[in-house]
Image: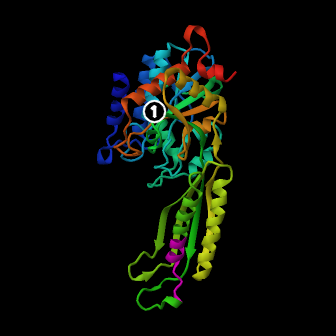
Amino acid sequence: MARVHGRIEELFALSPGKNGGASRPAFSRAEARAMLLVAAWAREAGLEPSVDPHGNLWCLPPGDAPCVTSGSHVDTVPGGGRYDGPLGTVLAVEAASRAGGGRGVLVCAAEEASRFGAGTIGSRSMTGKLSEGDLSRLRDTGGLDALTARAEYLDALGGLPRLRSAPLERVSSHVEVHIEQRAALRDKGLSLGVATTIAGPVRHGLRFSGEVAHAGETPASERRDALCAAAETVLLAEELGRRCAPETTATVGTLEIHPNSLTSIPGTAKLGVDIRGVRPGGARRLLEELLDGARKAADRRGVYLEEGQISASEPTEMDGAMVAAVEEACARLGVRCGRCVSFAGHDAQHLAAVVPSALLFVASENGVSHAPGEAVAEEDVEAALGVLCLLMESPRGEPSVMLRGLR
């Protein structure tokens, strides 16, 4: 395990960020440096690293035979932790090394949404869910589009062989290991969790337009306060999220007001709403109820409401045979594992559309995510590696647990 922890620390120290964390933005030179480091480790394990047109790192065994792959990502949010992404990536390299050949590593690019406002870009691009045109419309705060950023990132990976397309035909099954992003597993006394469903996010924008007026001289009865209508909607989102828990969440994550002056009644207020559900149609039903409440709030206050969809997707059901394979491996090793859902997006949910895939969580010690305080227990990391090795290895020439589970 010393090599596993040493490599995680090496990645963490590669690009220091704010507040003692790591900062490797999507499609940045910092992400490229991390990919090159992983590629070097993969070569030591006897794998052949290369990069596809979407920026994903493929480390596959020689030849063209199908293989089981594992991996996660290496980009981070600003000031991120050491485990989100690198834990699954380093464990994948270690498991492939211990399997003695015939197993691969897939590290997806640009998983975090913090730079371009959209996540899992590498996995969505290679599975046909994002087009080149989509990437050209995604921009960071400096105005650089994701397509241009990807080109610069690929140039920084110039030492790696380029693939003409993502070799998904070589993947017989895939498993992603990730640190848990809350503390539910630890509370249940579990070391690992296997996801049965990954939530589908629905994101919507709302704009309330009222009338700018003097804060002191305008009577309450004559006000058309856009912010007050927006505030009612924010509180309604909170109420609906609590009512629909634990299957659906609702969050107002952005708020912009104009003129944003202490002495003025706000004339416009824009909200960004994120709704996630693990049941088909659940997020859309909550959204409709929220929009109905927003319209009523706007009418009561003499405010005009405009709304529009930013993005929408349905929840992903993970492959039942893959879930069973993970549970079988845990049972054989005596690892306490339970089924769970994920409200956060992951590359595995997009790969699941084209290859049988599993998402395995390592219990968080404290529920901290996307911050330097991320923590996992040594014994849980060891358990995850043992399970991953069992899933990927083929003792005495027999098919691996995953491959047998998919017959």
In the image, residue 243 lies in the stretch drawn in magenta: no
The image quadrant where one finds the C terminus is top right
Q: Which residues are magenta?
A: 222-232
> What residue is drawn where x is 56% and y is 74%?
208
Front residue of this view, candidates 61 and 240: 240
Q: Is residue 385 visible?
A: yes
- Residue drawn at x 63%, y 16% is 65
Coloring applied to the structure:
rainbow
Viewer-side residue, 185 vs 132:
185
Q: In the image shown, does 18 or 51 lie closer to the viewer?
A: 18
Q: Say above or below: 146 vs 171.
A: below
Residue at 61% x, 11% y is 398
Residue 76: percent from left, percent from top = 42, 42
Task: Name the amino acid type tagged 1.
Answer: Ser
Residue 268 picture location, percent across and down: 52, 75
Residue 38: which quarter of the image?
top left
Q: Is residue 60 visible?
A: no
Q: Kindly state the secondary structure of the residue where label 1 is placed.
A: loop
Relative vertical location of residue 8 with respect to residue 254 in this rendering, above or below: above
Name the quadrant containing residue 308. bottom right
Left or right of 229 on screen, residue 299: right
Q: Quadrant of the N terminus?
A: top left
Main secondary structure along the magenta-highlighted residues: helix
The location of residue 106, given as percent across then percent down, is: 53, 28
> Would you say residue 226 sits in the magenta stretch?
yes
Residue 180 in the image: state x and y as whole percent. 46, 40
Task: Examine the rendered structure and indicate whether residue 319 appears above or below residue 258.
Answer: above
Q: Residues within 10 Å of mark 1 (few under 14, many from 20)?
A: many
Quarter assignment of residue 305: bottom right
On the image, numbered disc 1 is attached to which residue?
A: 191
